[in-house]
Image (cartoon, helix red, strand yellow):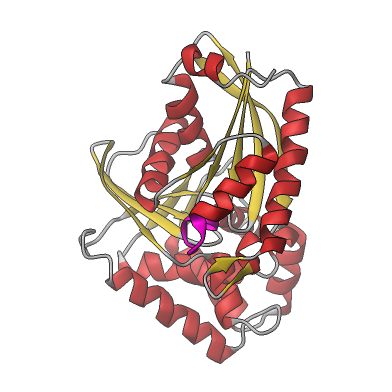
């Protein structure tokens, strides 16, 4: 049986179609649109062009999913609709136009689902999970493989870029502003203990892009899933020094993130420094898989019958 989830994020909207057989699943198809919804937020409100953009992509993705005879389509939104003042109005219009329910996740729910997805893909024991998105960053501490405390901060790679960077790459003054904003948000996380977390479990597009840069620079195989924090420090320094090789590397390895990868890496570096981390273990699964597992697999076929897209 086939099921579809659509992740309405601040920077990208992603359709994922899963095949389920005997309580196991695999990803059959994915499609991504870089919509930059957070760029349509003015004075705290998602503007009509932003709503129109979201609806256009969602309608296209729903059409694709229905053409593949999926049993159920589930749409969820993260900081894209969570961190605006007109959430209720925007969600109501999107739902009416698209014809599907949109679930807006809280920051804590998003961090929890990140953890559920990550542990399905890799084995983790003790540390802190980090997901740097476009409009927010989720963190969750865990011990003995069990979630302890999920949390969220309202900065991500795209809104850091929009707030502090004038052109494509940040200047020295802009770089320092991003570092300062990142550290300030981390210090405000009162319910996550400021202590050493040697291991970070990294999920999401920014961390996966960092892994691609790391593996290419240090001649590691594509299957390698760890970033030593000393390697991350080296990569960030290359970018800060405006090394021409580093710039061309970004265009080669992650061209779709050319304007957001540096703010995201600055934030990731600040996180590793703040928690005195030694390595980042990168999971290919995250919030989308966590959402799929909890909302579809664990709820079972009964909900699928209620929401069937025929």
Q: In this view, does 258 lie above or below 89?
A: below
The x, y position of residue 63, in whole percent, is 77, 32
**Nearer to me, 140 or 65:** 65
**Nearer to me, 175 or 249:** 175
Task: Look at the image and say whether residue 82 sits in the magenta stretch.
Answer: yes
- Number of numbered markers: 0
Report the span colored magenta: 80-87
The reply, left or right, for residue 232 in relation to residue 97 is left
Check the image and name the residue furthest to the bottom. 173
The residue drawn where x is 27% and y is 65% is 189
The residue drawn where x is 58% and y is 16% is 20
The residue drawn where x is 61% and y is 84% is 241
Quadrant housing the N terminus = top right
**Nearer to me, 230 or 294:** 294
The x, y position of residue 298, in whole percent, is 41, 20
The residue drawn where x is 45% and y is 79% is 179
| Residue 138 in view, yes or no | yes
Quadrant housing the C terminus = top right
The reply, left or right, for residue 125 in relation to residue 155 is left
The x, y position of residue 117, in whole percent, is 45, 35
| Residue 235 in view, yes or no | no
The reply, left or right, for residue 273 in relation to residue 301 is left
């Amino acid at each position: 049986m086939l099921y579809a989830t659509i992740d309405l994020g601040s920077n990208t909207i992603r359709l994922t179609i899963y095949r389920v057989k005997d309580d196991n699943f695999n990803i059959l198809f994915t499609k991504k649109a870089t919509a930059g919804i957070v760029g349509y937020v003015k004075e705290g409100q998602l503007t009509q062009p932003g709503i129109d953009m979201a609806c256009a992509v969602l309608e296209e993705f729903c059409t694709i999913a229905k053409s593949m005879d999926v049993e159920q389509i589930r749409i969820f939104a993260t900081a894209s609709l969570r961190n605006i003042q007109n959430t209720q109005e925007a969600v109501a219009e999107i739902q009416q136009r698209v014809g599907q329910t949109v679930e807006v996740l809280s920051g804590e729910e998003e961090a929890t689902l990140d953890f559920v997805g990550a542990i399905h893909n890799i084995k983790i024991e003790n540390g802190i999970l980090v997901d740097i998105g476009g409009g927010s960053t989720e963190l969750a501490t865990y011990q003995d493989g069990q979630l302890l405390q999920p949390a969220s901060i309202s900065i991500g790679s795209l809104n850091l870029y929009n707030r502090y960077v004038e052109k494509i790459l940040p200047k020295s003054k802009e770089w320092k502003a991003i570092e300062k904003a990142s550290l300030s948000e981390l210090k405000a996380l009162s319910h996550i203990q400021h202590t050493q977390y040697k291991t970070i479990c990294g999920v999401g597009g920014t961390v996966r892009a960092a892994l691609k840069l790391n593996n290419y620079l240090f001649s590691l195989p594509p299957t390698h899933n760890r970033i030593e924090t000393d390697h991350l420090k080296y990569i960030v320094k290359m970018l800060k020094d405006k090394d021409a090789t580093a710039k061309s590397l970004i265009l080669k390895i992650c061209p779709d993130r050319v304007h957001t990868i540096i703010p995201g890496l600055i934030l990731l570096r600040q996180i590793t420094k703040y928690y005195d981390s030694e390595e980042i273990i990168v999971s290919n699964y995250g919030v989308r898989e966590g959402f799929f597992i909890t909302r579809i697999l664990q709820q079972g076929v009964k909900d699928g019958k209620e929401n069937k897209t025929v």
